[in-house]
Image (cartoon, rainbow, N blue to C red):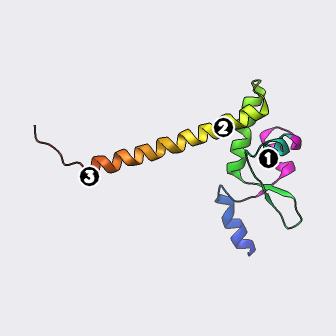
Amino acid sequence: MTADDSFNRLDDDDYPAYTMGRAAEMIGTTQGFLRAIGEARLITPLRSEGGHRRYSRYQLRIAARARELVDQGTPIEAACRIIILEDQLEEAQRINAEYRRTAESETPATAS
């Protein structure tokens, strides 16, 4: 990958651009917190060639949501489960909306 390719990927929400230290700093938490949500399998950071964790913007948004729940007193395991369920619900709602649009476009209009 060239330097130009790497620069262009910075707009990609899934590009692992942030080190663990920078990611923790950005969301105002500790590196231990990021390791904990990784162990809970909420996010799985990619690894650099040297084995260091790298986080994407998408993963940072998830980690920030987990931090928000934990800051409100939710145990970390429960916070991770809540976020997973929220994500599943959002996906189901997106699929349902897509099915509705398809069904509406296939249903002939009735004359009144």
SS category of the residue bearing label 1: helix
**In the depicted view, which residue is nearer to us: 23 or 109?**
109
- Give residue 39's position: percent from left, percent from top: 81, 45
Mark 3: amino acid? Glu
Please determine whether, in this image, residue 26 is positioned above or below residue 14.
Answer: above
Residue extending farthest left: 112
**In the depicted view, which residue is nearer to us: 87 or 24?**
87
Magenta residue span: 16-32
First reached walking from the N terminus: tag 3 or tag 1 = 1
**In the depicted view, which residue is nearer to us: 54 or 80?**
80
Label 2 and label 1: CA atoms lie apart by 13 Å
First reached walking from the N terminus: tag 2 or tag 3 = 2
Mark 2: amino acid? Ile
Q: Which residue appears at 50% of the width and 43% of the height? A: 92
The N terminus sits in image quarter: bottom right
SS category of the residue bearing label 3: helix
Please determine whether, in this image, residue 10 is positioned above or below residue 109.
Answer: below
Residue denoted by label 2: 83
SS category of the residue bearing label 2: helix
Q: Are marks 2 and 3 in contact (CB under 8 Å)?
A: no
Does the magenta portion include 27? yes
Does the magenta portion include 62? no
Residue denoted by label 1: 38
